[in-house]
Amino acid sequence: MALTQMAICAAVIVLASAFTAVPTALGRSAQPTWSDNRTARALQWLVLALSVLGFALPLLSVLVDGVVGGFGRVIAQPSFWQATATSIGIGAASAVQTLLLALVLALGRAAAANSVARTLLGVPAYAYLAVPSVVLSLGFFLLVRNLGLPLGAVSPIVVICANSLLALPFAMATLAPPLDAIARTKGKLLLSLNMSGWAQFARIEYPLLGRDIGLMLALSFCFSLGDLGVIALFGTQDFQTLPLLMYRALGSYRNNDAAVIAAILLIGTIVAFVGLPRLIERLAHAPRQ
């Protein structure tokens, strides 16, 4: 059943990756005008309000329970700070690795001259949408065991690689459309200026993609920060992240500690999503000497 699911999903993803992405990140699109009547608009606002409540109430519950659940007791534990440092380190490494892989694939896909090459370059990124994270984690785990590698030594590398691969499709979806737009609108100009490689990326593409790169880094970092599927197989007492620490707290009926960790994870993801895109965009437009 798992192989059947993977085959169907892979076929759909390969077909979808053959189509040209629609550029949306380089300019403001025209605002749509709606001619709905008042009843339809009221129904739309009602659906939106109910959706916001359904999404916000669990998050507010996490924050409230985290604040009153013994915040000081949790942050006083050495295991908490060790797990926090591990989560941040793995999240940052996974985000950087995802950025490098996505840029290589997206730049090659934007420069490809035919649809076959574009499809082949899109397969490595979008294929992982057809593979559940637990399947990928189990595959890495069996590979490490079959090769006889020490689990403690390779665990950080495996977790970083697995988290990076799981975030790669979303990174490609963020970076590929604007890079396609740059290739179409500025390709002839770049050829006339004889620009390519690092000079082209640093002077042309990076300033235009600052916010998109920041959004991609934030997305990859938060995916890795909140991942439990990979670390559940490779985590040990000396190598654990905040999600694994939260899961173990729930398993030992320390619900208040788990609520505090969940609240910290929520705050961390919000800060990353708000801060990273703005920071990278500001660095991209910073004056150069």
Image: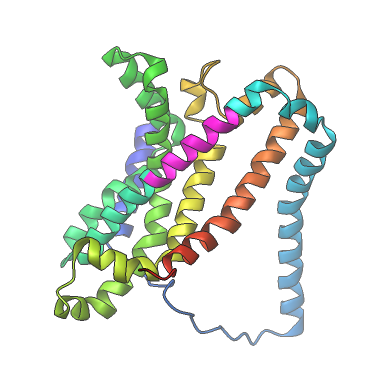
The image quarter containing residue 179 is: bottom left
Given residues 148 and 32, the one toward you in this image is 148
At a point 77% along the width and 56% down the height, the residue shown is 53
Magenta stretch, main secondary structure, is helix
- Horizontal and vertical percent for residue 160? 41, 34
- Horizontal and vertical percent for residue 118? 22, 60
At a point 58% along the width and 25% down the height, the residue shown is 82
Query: Which quarter of the image is occupied by the C terminus?
Result: bottom left
Given residues 121 and 95, the one toward you in this image is 95
Given residues 238 and 220, the one toward you in this image is 238
Give the magenta part as a residue range. Answer: 83-96
Can residue 265 be seen here? The reply is yes
Query: Which quarter of the image is occupied by the N terminus?
Result: top left
The image quarter containing residue 225 is: top right
- Horizontal and vertical percent for residue 22? 37, 71
Q: Is residue 187 above or below residue 106?
A: below
Please check the rendered image and state whether residue 175 is part of the magenta-colored stretch, yes or no: no
Given residues 210 and 245, the one toward you in this image is 210
- Horizontal and vertical percent for residue 79? 63, 22
At a point 37% along the width and 41% down the height, the residue shown is 165
Q: Is residue 170 above or below residue 142?
A: below
Left or right, 15 with respect to 44, comes to: left
